[in-house]
Image (cartoon, rainbow, N blue to C red):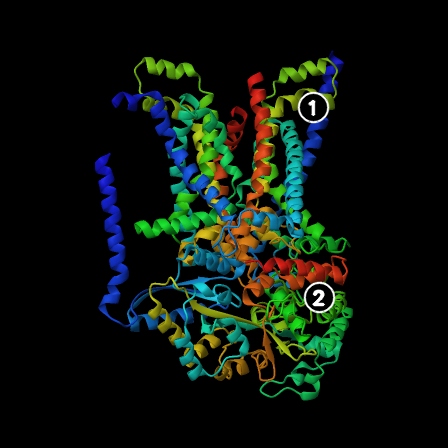
Amino acid sequence: MAAARSSMKGDRRKAMLWSYVFLCIFVVFTLTPPVYMLITSLKTNAEISAAVAPWWIFAPTLAHYVELLTSPVYLTFFRNSVLVSMLVVAITMAVSIPAAFALSRMKFWGSATLATGVFLTYLIPETLLFIPLFQTFVWVTEATGIELINRWWVLVILYPTLTVPFATWIMIGYFSSIPKELDEAALIDGASYLQILTRIFIPVALPGIIAATIFAFTVSWAQFLYPLAFTTSTDQLVLPVGIITTLIKGDVFTWGQIMAGALLGAAPPLIIYAFLMDYYIAGLTAGATKG
Amino acid sequence: MASREVNRRRFLASSIAATAAVVTGPYIRTSHAAGKLEVGFWDHWVPGANDVLTKMCNEWAAKEKVEIKIDYIPSQGGKNMLTIAAEAQAKAGHDMLAFPTWQPADKAKDLEPVDDVMKDLVAANGAVSPLIEYLGKVGGHWISIPATPGSQIKGPCARIDLFKQHVGLDLTKMYPAGAAPDKALSDAWTWDAFLSAAEKCHKAGVPFGIGLGATSDSVDTMGTLFGAYGAQLVDAKGNITVKSDAVKQVLEYMKKLVLVLPPDVFAWDDSSNNKWLVAGKGALIMNPPSAWAVAKRDNVKVAEQLWSFPAPSGPKGRVQPYLPYFWGIWKFSKNKAAAKSLMRHISERSAVEKMVAASQGYDIPAFAKLNDFKTWAEEGPPKGTLYHYPPKPGQILQVSAYPAPPKIAAQIYTQAITTKMVAKCTQGGESIDKAIAWAATELQGFMRV
Amino acid sequence: MKTFLQRKSTIAFAMALPLILIVALLVLYPAVYSIHMATLNKSMEHFVGLDNFAFLFTRETFWMVVRQSVVFALSAVAFKALIGFCVAHFVHNVPVKGQRKWRGMLLVPWVIPPAMSTLAWLWLFDPSYSAFNWSLEQIGIPGVNWLGSPNWARFAVILVNVWVGAPFFMIMYLAALKSVPEQLYEAADIDGANWWQKLWYVTLPMMRNIIAITALFSLIVTFANFDIVRVLTSGGPVDQTHMFATWAFKVGIEGSDLPLGAAVSLFMFPILAVAATFILRDITRRGNEA
């Protein structure tokens, strides 16, 4: 018995050592592109063109970052991205939480199909939708006078199609795991459904809500095709499209600035992730394991 | 419920009325151009070039009392193509846009005729080349005017030192600054001479950087070669003529040229050849002066050795790879008068001269009397490097896929049929006949209506 | 009226209504419209029925795109699953205290917007300035034609997709691994099982659901991928890295033939629907058994 246990321990130790080795290899693979982005963004244009030593910086400079952070154009992109993402997050949560509550707890005609089918909207890709959507928005603009073309707030209407299904799915997972006894007790005490939702479910499922919020934010922030199709004027662009279309002009690339711009563009999701990593991961996983 | 419905209807009605008032109001006031105007220009890569155009437009807008909104739409990532397609489909968007090469003819039925503007411009600025007429005039009507910003020639831009050393040719002697070309040398500057120079440079480790990808630089270069040999994919009547000896001849030529080009040219985009030249890796690229301008900033030693000059000549003459831009007004625009007035203003000689100077000589005006600006003679270092960049008499200006009917040509261009044919019979290992057969099926597909 | 409003099913429906509206108006309606569009001729003036589809079937490029999309999606998802699974095990083997920082570093590709990180890869693969080629040349290996040769370009696109997506798999599998009860492993040890048998008889069965769901989600997203291919290769060289989404864009928008573009995009749909039904059926069956 003791011999078996000690060989188990030896096995465990070997497994751990090999794990560290492979983990280091994978981390190098994982972090090479972001690190390279950082290195390039700190180099002068001349050094980049000379291509002497791509992995090393001889004369570091913050010029690219300064240029971007003092450029009103780039800051407009940032502002637009922030506005769009935050509004989309608000809308997503306002739609997903009640819907998830309804689908996980309350039965109505078609609720079972809706619950499993909600994520099937992901089967219909954006490349299919943006032309008919453009046409529809034009028609609505003409009929009501509300400008829906080439305005950043159009994205606020569109992005929820991408965030709401998965957010709802995450919330359904969390809500399903709350024991039914809790709401039955509350009902007996005379609580309305709204009170059950706000007093019981939301506090208990708070990690899931935070996770869904982070997910919605990250997806909105990273969107490329919809803004590419729907916004043209420079002052309406969001970051991903802004960087790729304005920093890359025709046949002239300024890689230092592009990399700096890309890193700054990736910063908000990364920062949120760094601080709220546990919620982020919990949300992704819980939604799936329970759902 | 009922009251909400009434309120909504009232809101709709009042907002429609308000919109109508805003749109029609100014028209009632005066018959001159006024009201609002939304324009989308090509986003110039030269820093400061956009600002000059903005200033001119704002001056015009102040004078005409028009509320103008200017967007600069880049060609990178196909953004301008996307905008054009979306606005044509939705019949809504900007009033006036910049259209690349084949687009005006492709979208002719959505564009407002501008014969009146062209008549005045030609009278003031001189005639335009037959190519411009071919691209900008459809069904007897001008549906766009040639634009200066963005119109470029993708001729050779080469290293004086490397050519002297490895090819034994003095570029500054063949095409001297401020003077006519040396007859003997320039007559000898044919595509065969190009091939032999490429071979010599390849041996010396500084090959030519001729892209064979799917972006416009590559397609334009092939267009020049095809044009110089009279190899047409589709003729002016719309017949598929790709199975011709001229096309075979060009593909045989390319098989030899590809051997002395860098192996990754098939993935090159519009910036790759620039980077190639600026990094000092090659002796020649086919590009407008943007590469030289970047070298000026990042690698002056290379910049000082660069020289722009005309493309080689072939059996059908000296064809220059021209890429014109146009300005057009959508039929759905609500302020065509203002748009036409703006077109006139930014096509005046003084305006064009300012734009060319701001672009450091990159932009090429389409009108005959506007090709003598000082900019090209004076830009440097080295001084005179751009003197032979703008077109001169005796050169044939052509666009890739010419003379196919515009709708078919637009497809040939965007689908990069020429470069793909070359890729198939070189890197792809297929026979020339097979590549031509493939092109024929693709072209048949483009005939669809 | 009042009781109707207070009835449970009405309230439930009202709460789910925004979701239903969003999906109906912004997803289903445009999807149906695009089906209609795919039956029009190029100038969108006449109805031509299934002509666009018939035309696509005669195109060599179309079949190439089908093959490429399927190969890309299947191989990318397979690699992501494999790598995710292995790395999850490695993280699981490390003492719990240290796991957090490893997890943190390994999830970074998933957090960075793909459009931004693909730019970094584009720069790393650049024909003239590739840092990878520079490093290879330092150790005497000639540079690779990353984006110019068809097979390397396909490899590059799959590589970037795997880089972005594998962390997702890793996180999911890690969570699932943690939820496998320790007693099962101890029982297996007592029975004298080696690590391979433990994996096959304990770990994999417990994780079946997660493996299926993650693979399905990833298959859908990978199959419809636009950003990575568009930024990295634009479908080149010579259309050999085109997927449905990017080719639809090229043919539809850049080729001024919107109905044809719509027709191309629609082909994604049935393949995904089939995959989705199979895996979903498997999950619900398993859920009912449990």
Residue C88 percent location from the top left of the image: 63, 31
Q: Which mark, by number, is residue B230?
A: none
Amino acid type, label 2: Lys
Q: Is residue C97 visible?
A: no
Name the image quarter holding the N terminus of chain C: top left
Pick the residue in front: B70 or C92: B70
| Secondary element at tag 1 | helix
- Outermost residue toward the top? A1
| Secondary element at tag 2 | loop
Camera-side mark, 2 or 1: 2
Q: Residue at x 43, y 47 (%)?
A: A133
From the viewer's perspective, is residue C40 above or below residue B65?
Answer: above
Left or right of C277 in this view: B12 = left
Left or right of B404 in this view: C17 = left
- Outermost residue toward the left? B3
Name the image quarter holding the C terminus of chain C: top right
Amino acid type, label 1: Leu
Q: Alpha-carbon distance for marks 2 and 1?
A: 61 Å
Q: Which mark, by number, is residue B243?
A: 2
Q: Residue at x 44, y 81 (%)?
A: B122
In the rendered image, which residue does mark 1 sit on? C199
Residue A165 percent location from the top left of the image: 46, 34
Instruction: Give the image quarter of residue A199.
Output: top left
From the viewer's perspective, is residue A108 above or below residue B175?
Answer: above
Residue A242 percent location from the top left of the image: 47, 55
Circles 2 and 1 on the same chain: no
